[in-house]
Amino acid sequence: MVRSVEALVDEVCPPEIAALGVAAGIAAGVGRVLDAAAPATRLALRAGIAARAAGVPLPAALAGAVRDLILTVAYEQPEAHAALGYDPARWVARTSALRAERWGAEIRSSAAELLRPDPLVTGTTPRRHPGRFVSAAALDAELIACDAVVVGSGAGGSAVAAELAEAGWDVVVLEE
């Protein structure tokens, strides 16, 4: 399978990524992903990789899955990060420092509360946090003003909304 993935790197990846000489690293990364995948997924993707490398036409969904897997692993290569000027460690350190500066006292306070013997004592009032939930029927669409609208409050939407709010943006999150 390693040779099949390596053969697909030039076909699937943009030329600037393929030119980095990371085909072996991509093949190893794809192997690790497939080892961790559910058996049916692993079998389907391995067959799809082998078939595509052999030039056999694939159903669109399987061809897309093979392409997406290879591209995802390709863009996780350190050489790709360097070529793109992406330094996640620097971003994480900077964001962690900003959050510690802004929220450090509250984090420490909450940590102390969590370590109390009975943190769920009846009668305590939780701290109020800014923001509110409003039903669609109660909204006056002409009065809504914000810097960003995030559609969906799932894992991605809530993370983006939190990042924007921390940066001082007025954010509206829409959910069904």
Image: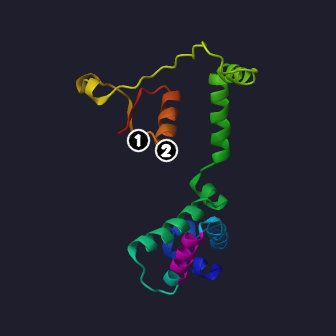
161 on left or right of 39: left
In the rendered view, would you say 44 is above or below 124?
below
Between 67 and 174, the one nearer to me in the picture: 174
Residue at screen point 25% across, 23% down: 140
Q: How many marks?
A: 2
Q: CA distance from mark 2 to mark 1?
A: 8 Å
In the rendered view, would you say 150 is above or below 137?
below
Q: Residues within 10 Å of mark 2 (few under 14, many from 20)?
A: few
Residue 142 point in image, percent of width and height:
23, 24
The amino acid pointed to by label 2 is Gly
Residue that mark 2 sits on: 156
Residue at screen point 48% across, 68% down: 65
In the rendered view, would you say 135 is above or below 13?
above
Residue that mark 1 sits on: 152
Tell me the chief SS of the magenta region: helix
| Secondary structure beneath label 1 | loop
Between 87 and 25, the one nearer to me in the picture: 25
- C-beta proximity under 8 Å, tags 2 and 1: yes
Write down the quadrant of residue 33 in the picture: bottom right
Please provide the residue range marked out in magenta. 39-50
Q: Does the magenta-highlighted stretch encompass residue 51?
A: no
**Residue 139, visible in the rendered structure:** no
